[in-house]
Image (tube, helix red, strand yellow):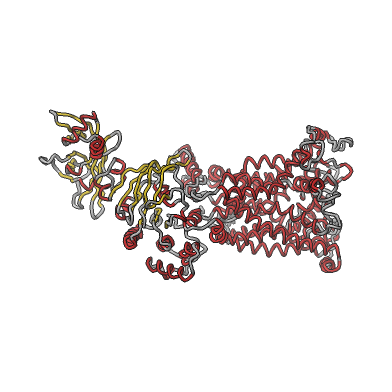
């Protein structure tokens, strides 16, 4: 009987199932009551908006000042935003590697580009490692039965609780030890190993929480989907690839964004493992601000704004998704 | 006879490998290093075992004035930031919940911004705000208002220490930490059936009565959870403090917590043995708090048994 | 107790009209059921009375007091939600006492009132428990106790029985009705279950798509449905409908349904002729029809239809026979001994006074149409 059923029909059946489940996974629009309409909420709203706004305003101003300063001839601090002169001079200087109008070229344009590329490589590397590892493990923990399943998940939470600072000493010791086996004269191999080790070490930091998140996403898929597919004669792997993964795509994209931002924003790991041979935007800013004699802050502001850009971009585009995922770690 | 490997294991190999290499081995190694005289990453020194690091740490606690400053800073910083993170997070989550949805959205973005900002940029923002000299935002504002006559080095001026350094640390970390509580509490409030709020309204409750009698009592466990988790994270993370100290925005000792001290001893003064010993203390605290957090999460309930194994 | 009166009440959510110009009186001390399918606006109507929603236009009165813009607390209403909305962190006692504590009543008075209402609802032994330790039926009682403890002038029930299992629902609906009669309280009960509505209501208000379809006693909405919607929404199985064309033979007006002819009364004929109606819906309830083997000579002018038996569903107390008449499925409720063979040809007889006629275009019952015309143009 199984054979008489054409592959195409199985596939279309699965597609229909997926469509059904997708519909179900979507959060239903709230149809209940929100609050009592006969009570005036305007005053409450206004009061809360004012309090939250005032409390958050200082920080928000700091961001505004940073971004504006990157275009100004001086570091802005309030009223002087009206008197300052604005241009893209700072950005030009940054990409030319001149860190102040007085100083000469401390970096080449190539250096600056490489710094950005390095930051991207770390971020994308971390994303790739986190995704592969946690999608696989999250699926196994959510869907498969094996001994020590609960224990493993408990361990994940515990590991997440462990202080990174305690780990990093030993992780660095292992790094020093393994670097000893790489020939120093082969610069490419040496630097590649540095990069790879850093990416894996940094990604490992995200692993417990990512697996936990991914497990949550897998948990939401009804068992019936998998059953119906398995009954129709699809292999477990086929089910995984053609049904499960498409269904958790929103989860995967959320995780990808998290992992990317984690890798992108990292300071401690790139400082410890890569600096000064390989610089990223974080260590670049650290270095420039730290060297007092050359610090010209408007150019640093440009670098900071550049560094901030993807974060803000991602954030605005995926705000809703982030909030959902961030709250996913805690049981309601 | 063939040994049949559980397919789950295949899916878990990458995760288990990473956990082994970057958690389990380092954790054991770290405690072990605490008992060795490792210095300057001279791995040959790892052969001998000694309790010297712990003796020294114990001695420093009572006799090293700089280390005393670190301990006091750690206590003050952790206590105040924790209070801000939990109470502020609760207040924020509550306010956002009570606000109209449309209105609360921009606020949620605003308050999450510090958490999502790269550490280097976030530190830069505050570095510049508290910068000594007339350039610094705070100085420039206060000078213009006539509150001060000369620019102050807020984080390092001996006349202002240690309080100003502590305020800076607490402020910088508070704005980041508060959003964790905000997210947890906001979603916790939203998981309370809205009908309960409306029912209370129908029964004549005011907003503040609803908050006190209906909403807050139902997030008790979330409060404990956030407290434990934030305590843990405040004791062990140091990234946001790291650059402020490095850039001289705050005093070296009055601006260092235990975790940053561990890091600097390991990577600046290169006494890895001592650093690992100090880190071991954090590992123990982490283990205890982590276990507590696990109990609170009612962990077993979240582990749904897989149904169909074929 | 009060009488609740709605005048031209409209509620819009954005562009969606949830309640459309509703005029309705909930009589003092009576049990009124708002009946309609899901999304019909019945709960919205209830929330309007509670003061949870503010009408977009129109007015709401409690007796002569205009409460349109008053918050719920100033209306003194008791409300039971579908999910009961009990506070999980409070004991049953605290749940019930909560409204009184908000009013800052003295503790002794609260205590006696809580015990009084708990006794009334027979939940005294549950007072120390938490809601999670109660069964659905018990939770429902607690919610009811919480609504009643403040001695409301109106009791509002938003599908309070829909989360209970079928058997429990039957018991509780009888008890609820008894309780309401005992207290003499004005009650408004929202449900989508027509049997529940029929069994409990003094008066049923049928609502669909935000518009009031009919208000009347259970008998009225059952026997004289105002329009096709009410006819087909009430009753289980619902009324059968067949569309027929109007024919005039030798001055007599008939409706032709399949092979059958049904002669219209003088009054109806007049209307049909004057309005130029070409089609009518003939409707009747399954329990009002009889199945016979051969067509009788029919002096009464009853409706007689010829049909093929499609399927017989024996339910023990009765059988439901589905037939195909003029290509349409028709259901008839018969005594258990009537079991015609599948595909056999039989005849359905519906007494003249049980046949309902509806206008195809408006869905209006012709009787009501006549009444309305009489009201407008008195002859």
Identified at 38% across, 56% down, the residue is C161
Q: Closer to the camera, C289 or C25?
A: C25
Quarter of the image that includes the N terminus of chain C: bottom left
Give percent across and percent down for residue A110.
81, 34
Extreme residue toward the front, this view: C64
Quarter of the image that includes the C terminus of chain C: top left
Give percent across and percent down for residue A92.
80, 32
Q: Closer to the camera, C354 or B1?
A: C354
Identified at 61% across, 58% down, the residue is A153
Work out whether residue A121 can be spotted: yes
Compared across the picture, whether B281 is left or right of A313 comes to right
Q: Is residue C285 shown above or below B202?
A: above
Q: Is residue A319 shown above or below A141?
A: above
Work out whether residue B302 can be spotted: no
Give percent across and percent down for residue B231.
69, 60
Q: Closer to the camera, A290 or C92?
A: C92
Identified at 62% across, 48% down, the residue is A49
Give percent across and percent down for residue B25.
73, 58
Identified at 33% across, 48% down, the residue is C205
Compared across the picture, whether A208 is left or right of B244 comes to left
Q: Closer to the camera, C233 or C339?
A: C233
Compared across the picture, whether B97 is left or right of B127 comes to left
How many numbered markers are drawn?
0
């Amino acid at each position: 009987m199984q054979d008489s059923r054409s592959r195409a029909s199985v596939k279309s059946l699965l597609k229909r199932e997926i469509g059904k489940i997708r519909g179900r996974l979507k959060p239903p629009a709230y149809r209940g009551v929100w609050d009592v309409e006969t009570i005036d909420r305007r005053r409450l709203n206004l009061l809360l908006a004012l309090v939250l706004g005032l409390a958050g305003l200082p920080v928000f101003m700091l961001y505004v000042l940073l971004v504006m300063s990157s275009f100004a001839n001086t570091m802005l601090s309030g009223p002087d935003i009206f008197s300052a002169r604005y241009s893209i001079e700072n950005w030009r200087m940054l990409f030319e590697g001149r860190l102040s109008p007085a100083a000469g070229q401390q970096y080449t344009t190539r250096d600056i580009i490489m710094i950005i590329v390095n930051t991207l490589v770390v971020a994308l590397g971390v994303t790739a490692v986190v995704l592969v590892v946690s999608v696989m493990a999250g699926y196994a923990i959510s869907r498969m039965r094996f001994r020590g399943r609960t224990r493993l998940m408990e361990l994940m939470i515990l590991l997440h609780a462990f202080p990174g600072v305690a780990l990093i000493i030993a992780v660095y010791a292992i790094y020093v030890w393994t670097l000893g086996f790489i020939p120093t004269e082969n610069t490419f191999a040496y630097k590649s190993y540095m990069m790879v080790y850093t990416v894996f070490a940094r990604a490992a930091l995200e692993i417990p929480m990512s697996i936990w998140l991914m497990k949550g996403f897998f948990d939401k898929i009804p068992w019936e989907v998998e059953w119906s597919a398995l009954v129709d004669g699809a292999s477990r792997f086929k089910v995984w690839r053609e049904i499960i993964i498409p269904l958790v795509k929103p989860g995967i994209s959320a995780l990808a964004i998290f992992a990317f931002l984690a890798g992108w924003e990292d300071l401690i790991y790139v400082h410890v493992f890569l600096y000064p041979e390989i610089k990223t935007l974080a260590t670049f800013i650290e270095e420039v601000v730290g060297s007092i004699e050359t610090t010209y802050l408007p150019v640093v502001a440009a670098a900071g704004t550049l560094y901030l850009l993807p974060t803000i971009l991602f954030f605005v585009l995926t705000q809703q998704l982030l909030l959902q995922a961030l709250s996913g770690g805690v049981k309601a | 006879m063939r040994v049949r490997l559980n397919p789950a294991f295949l899916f878990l190999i990458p995760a288990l490998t990473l956990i082994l290499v970057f958690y389990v081995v380092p954790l054991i190694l770290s405690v072990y290093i605490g008992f060795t005289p490792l210095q300057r990453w001279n791995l040959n020194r790892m052969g001998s075992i000694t309790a010297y690091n712990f003796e020294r740490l114990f001695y420093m606690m009572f006799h090293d004035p700089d280390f005393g400053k670190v301990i006091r800073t750690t206590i003050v910083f952790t206590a105040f930031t924790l209070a801000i993170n939990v109470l502020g997070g609760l207040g924020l989550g509550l306010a956002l919940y009570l606000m109209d949805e449309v209105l609360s959205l921009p606020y949620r973005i605003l308050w999450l911004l510090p958490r999502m900002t790269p550490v280097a940029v976030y530190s830069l923002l505050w570095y510049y705000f508290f910068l000594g000299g007339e350039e610094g935002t705070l100085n420039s504002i206060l000078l213009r208002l006539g509150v001060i006559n000369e620019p102050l080095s807020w984080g390092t001026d001996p006349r202002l220490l240690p309080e100003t350094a502590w305020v800076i640390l607490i402020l910088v970390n508070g704005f980041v930490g508060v959003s964790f509580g905000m997210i947890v509490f906001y979603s916790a409030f939203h998981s309370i059936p809205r009908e309960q709020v409306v029912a209370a309204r129908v029964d004549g409750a005011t907003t503040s009565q609803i908050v006190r009698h209906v909403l807050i009592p139902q997030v008790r466990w979330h409060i404990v959870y956030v407290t434990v988790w934030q305590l843990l994270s405040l004791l062990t993370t140091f990234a946001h403090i790291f650059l402020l100290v490095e850039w001289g925005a705050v005093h070296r000792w009055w601006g260092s917590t235990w975790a940053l001290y561990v890091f600097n001893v390991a990577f600046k003064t290169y006494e890895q043995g001592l650093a690992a010993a100090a880190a071991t203390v954090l590992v123990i605290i982490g283990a205890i708090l982590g276990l507590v957090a696990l109990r609170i999460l009612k962990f077993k309930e979240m582990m749904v048994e897989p149904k169909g194994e074929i | 107790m009060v009488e609740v009166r709605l005048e031209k009440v409209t509620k819009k959510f954005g562009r969606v009209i949830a309640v459309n110009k509703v005029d309705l009186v909930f009589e003092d001390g009576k049990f009124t059921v708002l009946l309609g399918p899901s999304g019909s606006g019945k709960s919205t109507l209830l929330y309007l009375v509670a003061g949870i929603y503010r009408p977009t236009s129109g007015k709401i009165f409690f007796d002569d007091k205009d409460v349109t813009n008053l918050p719920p607390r100033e209306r003194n209403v008791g409300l039971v939600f579908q999910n009961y909305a009990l506070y999980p962190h409070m004991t049953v006692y605290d749940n019930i006492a909560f409204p009184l504590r908000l009013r800052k009543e003295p503790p002794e008075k609260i205590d006696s009132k809580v015990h009084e209402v708990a006794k009334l609802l027979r939940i005294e032994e549950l007072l120390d428990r938490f809601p999670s330790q109660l069964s659905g039926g018990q939770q429902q009682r607690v919610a009811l106790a919480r609504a009643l403890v403040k001695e409301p002038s109106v009791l509002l029930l938003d599908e309070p029985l829909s989360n209970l299992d079928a058997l429990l629902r039957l018991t509780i609906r009888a008890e609820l009705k008894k309780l309401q009669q005992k207290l003499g309280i004005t009650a408004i009960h929202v449900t989508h279950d027509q049997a529940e509505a029929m069994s409990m209501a003094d008066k049923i208000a049928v609502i669909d798509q935000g518009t009031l379809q009919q208000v009347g006693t259970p008998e009225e909405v059952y026997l004289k449905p105002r329009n096709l919607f009410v006819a087909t929404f009430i009753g289980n199985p619902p009324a059968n409908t067949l569309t027929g064309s109007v024919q005039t033979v030798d001055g007599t007006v008939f409706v032709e349904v399949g092979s059958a002819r049904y002669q219209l009364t003088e009054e109806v004929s007049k209307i049909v002729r004057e309005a130029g109606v070409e089609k009518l819906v003939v409707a009747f309830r399954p329990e009002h029809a009889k199945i016979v083997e051969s067509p009788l000579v029919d002096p009464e002018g009853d409706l007689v239809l010829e049909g093929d038996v499609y399927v017989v569903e024996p339910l023990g107390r009765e059988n439901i026979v589905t037939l195909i008449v003029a290509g349409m499925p028709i259901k008839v409720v018969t005594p258990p001994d009537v079991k015609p063979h599948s595909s056999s040809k039989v005849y359905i007889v519906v007494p003249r006074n049980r046949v309902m006629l509806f206008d195809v275009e408006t869905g209006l019952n012709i009787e009501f149409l006549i009444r309305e015309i009489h009201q407008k143009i008195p002859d």
